[in-house]
Image (cartoon, helix red, strand yellow):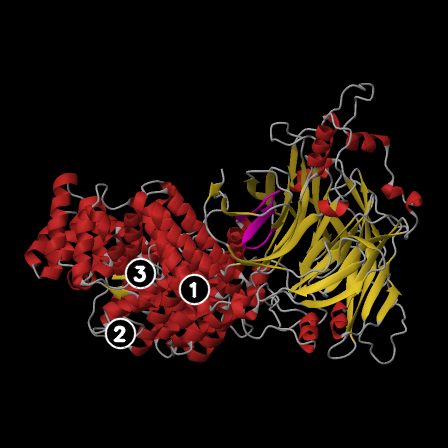
Amino acid sequence: MVHVYNCHPFASQQIVPTEQEPGLVCCGGGALFVVSAGGCKIEAFLLEEEGCPLICRFATMGTVQRILHSEIGDYLVTIEEKNNATYLRAYTNWRYQAAEKTRVGVRLLGHFLRGSSLHGAPKEQMEIIEIPLFERPLCVACCGVTGDLLVGCPKSLVLFSLKRQALSDKLSILDFERCLILHLTGLSPHQVAICSGYIALQAELEVLVVKLERLPGSAFTQKSADNKPQDHSLVPKDMITGAEHDTDTELRREGLAGNQDLDDFFIFPKHQELLGEMAKDCGVKVSLEWTGMESESRDNLAITYILYRRFAPDFFQGCSVEDTHLHSLQLHPMFTSNQDFCADGSRGVEPTCVFCFFSLPSTGYVYSVRGGVEMVSAYQYPEKAQQAVLTDLFLHIITKNALQCFSVRCAAVAARAEDPYIDTTMKACPPITMEVCALRIQLFIGLKALCHNRHHIVLLTAADVETKEDTEKATRRNTNRKSSFAKHRDPSEMGHGWNLYVVNTVPPLQLYNEMVEYSKKYEETNPLSQSCLHLLSEAHLLLRATLLAPRMRNPVGQCQSSNQNLSLSLGYNATDTTGSSTDRTPDRQELQLAFQESCAQLGDCFSRFDKRDCHLALPYYKMSGLSVTEVISRNRCLSVSPCGYGKGFLFFLKHSLYDETMEELTEETANEVLDIFGAAEPSQLPHVIASPSMVRASPGSGLAHLESLESITGPAVPLTLSKAALALRMGDLQLYRQHMDRHAEMLQVYGFIEEPKLLLHGRGHAVVPTPLARHLMESQDGLLVAALVALHENNKVKLDEADLFFQDLCGKVSGLQGGPQLLVDFWEALLMASSQEAVIQELLFRLTSVYIDRVACRDSNGIKPLKTADDLINSCSHFGVIYPWVSILTPAHFNIVHDHQEDLQKLQSLLCGPTLDVSSILPLLEQLPDEDNAGLSLHVLCATKLGHHDSSIERLLDCCPEAIIPYANHELQVNKRALWWQKLLPELCERTRAAGEENTILLSALKETLVVVAMELNPLEFLDLLPEDGTAEFFLPHLLDCSKRNLMT
């Protein structure tokens, strides 16, 4: 369905002062080119000035059959006919003809590239480049990104790359190099188009879009096809195997396959649409032949099929079979980033989107082909269309007697391609699938041709004073009369009337304002009118397309292309390269303000709706820049309407209150919000009251609303907690305690999970505890810690945010090393609950750092932790049971402060546990001396964990020999068993000998060591270990035990 409105996208029109009847027209670069009816003269007119003054005129070398202008390079390309031969020519530097410099140079393709006669003084002259072809050229196209030239021939497409060299500041030389031939099997193009590597070709009822891609490391091949590469050089067409047509292909093209004997029937092919990979099955084979410079890369080109569409004549569309054919093929790029021109004249970056347009007499189609192919829009024309042109803002078509302007969805596609936040709660854009509309149908008489450049539409009209049919009817009437003569008119009396119009489109901002005023008529009749929403959406897309244009992104400092420099040198006003003259470029700030107002109007529309699209009120209001108070004011009138507040407005208000960045509402507005939700969605009241934006709301009013809700729904934990928070704000501690005692602490934890904002406001570095959280710290710190652990485990709070929360909460009472005790309690509780490896390692490092700092400083302020070391050992797998030898080093009655005894035991327990990576805390241990047993235990634990048992044995023998045997019994097991006789026994023998019999500890340790060694070794090995100067009576019992054990085994 196509909506039809009566807007005014056309501002004014003027008649081009041509001397002769126009035959062909085209425009580009701010100029209009008119080929006279004789076809041998081209006139160029300046579109940007009033009256369209003549720039220059020049003769062609043949009768022009087709003409096209390229913005990149500012050149004209023509297909000309002379003496029954067809030629392809390019006209460069044509603007020099305006300075009455009649000198014209004629040269062949590649003359400049491969050695030319241009060495010397630069010549300011127009040049005509002859482009030879082996086949007759049928159609041409120029790339709007690179300026490359594509020529369609009966059996192939020939691609010429544009080359440029600057000879001086104002003079540059253009040339073309034939670089690629695409041989076609099964399709003869009537029209072609090229843009940024995409190639489209159109036959009578078929359209094919392919893409030339450079694939690194791949062979010169055809992607998604089965053709063999063409390796031969350019040869005549009868020798090119890739261009041969087999019988099946000819039959396919004629639609007669399988029906050769049915002479009385004509079989039409059926409708077919193939997208993406499926398009390779269309039956049209494309093979590549590289003809460019041998030094350039040729081994990584590939063809990718993008789109194939075939139509069958439809007898019910009001067109005869003969009139049913495709026309107006176009590949339209849309740029959104800063599009400066490179030194070679091409655009600096790739287009954001590429659209393919083609049309039947009754229907037009727009496809997006970049980044995935999809049909964007289909246009049903009210009458037969003769020609159409697609732009960023509109689709213009001409019928026999009307110029019609349709809306397009290019901006909707481009916005989504550029911004990933479109279609989220942050940003929105009218959908691509939204129905298109006709903005205007302007009547003209006898429209014949249409072309477009920037904000100008050029129309050629030719209305017959007396048509051929009228002449034949008049002749028949005169013949049937009794009179024997008929009056014949002189041919001059039956002359044709023609005009060439330039229609200027209105600035987008002006048209936007008109569309907004137009929409108010629908809104007055029905505030929920779909026509109002549709028209506002169209106006929004109009502004969005204008803001996406590169000149709006960076209106200052755009570099000028060579044609602009040439225009200035010849005295003409420069125009920007993106499509409008500098005096028409609107102020970006003005457009941005209009865009925000458009978002607000769309937000108003969706806020009134109760259907599925009502959620779009949220992103549109966010994009409008309006505050919540302003949005409430815009929707206040809905409160007295029969339907009340719309779901869209409630959706916006609810999500805005959940947003941490929203401004604080005044007391009046906050109370109004309570009334709104109390009447419309009372179930949301607990969440609304907890919002940081509602801190100024009356607690008495909020409590009354919650009491009313509880009387309807019954008690609930979040509701009770919200009532307790309000009672606390009112200063009623008795009522607060009454509500808090209604549910167990575990249920309250679940309530805080459901509504975290009861405890903390803000996110990131702006986390702030609520008054309820501060009160819980004084009265129920265990509940507060458990609630924060639950919030973290349910992804409601991040670890760093919880740190900031407790630091803010305990800032005035914190004096401990390593941070507030409540924060350490939180880390310990989270370590017990968390299953995320990254979080566990982070917590282990933080806790280890705190414990080491406290053990090193030995300072206390008497704050008792929530969990003792024994509690953690019994409930958390990351805390291990303290080794027996460690307990000997630091017994429970160890002479340090009790609080730090707990910290020391927790640290020892972590080192005895299975999770802590000891290597990560070695730098922290440097601040802890090993002069006392506390430091010694930690250093020996770390060394043992790292496998340094030898040094650990020496340390223990030096500082605490009574712990050596428990250490050896615990640590020297399995693969470390040999250390009993390799390290421990020699050390004990040496130290005992030095200390004498007075050191009973060492003597006892030696005896226990000998017992273990005697059990592990045979007598000979045991005997070898005994010292030569040892006392026999001391070692002999152990040697006898070793011998007895050996005999038994």
Residue 97 found in image quarter: bottom right
Residue 530 found in image quarter: top left
- For this rendering, which residue is in front, 494 or 496? 494
> With 60 as the anchor, is 712 left or right in this view?
left
Residue 708 found in image quarter: top left
Residue 606 seen in render: no
Foreground: disc 3 or disc 1:
1
Badge 1 is on which residue?
592
Mark 2 crowd level (few <14, some 14–19, many ≥20, 10 Å Cα): some
842 in magenta: no
403 in magenta: yes
Instruction: Examine the rendered structure and indicate whether residue 5 appears above or below residue 861.
Output: above
Q: Which mark is residue 728?
A: none
Residue 203 seen in render: yes
Residue at screen point 50% across, 69% down: 948
Badge 3 is on which residue?
660
Q: Earlier in the sequence, mark 3 or mark 2?
A: 3
Residue range of the region highlighted in magenta in the rendering: 390-408
- Check disc 1 and report its element: helix, strand or loop: helix
Instruction: Examine the rendered structure and indicate whether residue 815 appears above or below residue 379.
Output: below
- Name the dominant secondary structure of the magenta segment: strand
Q: Position of residue 52 (x, y in %)?
A: 63, 65
Q: Earlier in the sequence, mark 3 or mark 1?
A: 1
Report the Cα–Cα distance between label 3 and label 1. Answer: 26 Å
Residue at screen point 51% across, 65% down: 947
Type of residue at label 1?
A: Gln
Badge 2 is on which residue?
816
